[in-house]
Amino acid sequence: AQVEIGNTINYGSFGTTADIDCADGKSLNVGGSNNTLTIKGACAKVNIGGADNKISLDRVDAELSVVGLNNTVTYRDGEPKVNDT
């Protein structure tokens, strides 16, 4: 399920494939597992939790935090601070 609160997109699901649009500067929180997500636009902050997610981002500007297990996260543009815990 995807819920947007303020300027933050919250996505949580299991075993889905989805496209999400950060537009110009929204933040993104991802939870759940076994999701394949394609993120378009420029995300400000991205927080990835859960397990076995495959996430491809166009751009991350400020911060990329990855927690959980076996998550694969790639981004094409931006120079975010990366926290991999």
Image (cartoon, rainbow, N blue to C red):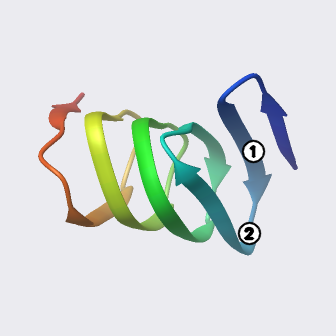
Q: Nearer the viewer, residue 49 or 5?
A: 5
Q: Classify 40 as above or below 12.
A: below
Answer whether labels 2 and 1 touch (C-beta < 8 Å).
Answer: no
Label tally = 2
Kindly identify which residue carries mark 2: 15
> Which quarter of the figure has residue 28?
top right
- Residue 39, percent from left and from top: 52, 65
- Residue 10, percent from left and from top: 71, 36
How crowded pointer 1 is (Cα within 10 Å; few <14, some 14-19, many 20+) is rated as some
Q: Nearer the viewer, residue 80 or 24?
A: 24
Identified by mark 2, the residue type is Gly
How crowded pointer 2 is (Cα within 10 Å; few <14, some 14-19, many 20+) is rated as few
Q: Is residue 15 left or right of residue 41?
A: right
Measured in 3D between alpha carbons, the distance from the residue under mark 2 to the one under mark 1, in whole angstroms, is 10 Å
Residue at the top extreme?
6
- Residue 71, percent from left and from top: 38, 56
Residue at position x 58%, y 55% in the image: 23
> Which quarter of the figure has residue 31?
top right
Could you tell me which secondary element the residue under label 1 belongs to?
strand
Kindly identify which residue carries mark 1: 12
Label at residue 24: none
- Residue 15, percent from left and from top: 74, 69
Residue at position x 12%, y 46% in the image: 79
Residue at position x 39%, y 64% in the image: 57
Could you tell me which secondary element the residue under label 2 belongs to?
loop
Identified by mark 1, the residue type is Gly
Q: Quadrant of the C terminus?
A: top left
Q: Is residue 81 left or right of residue 74?
A: left
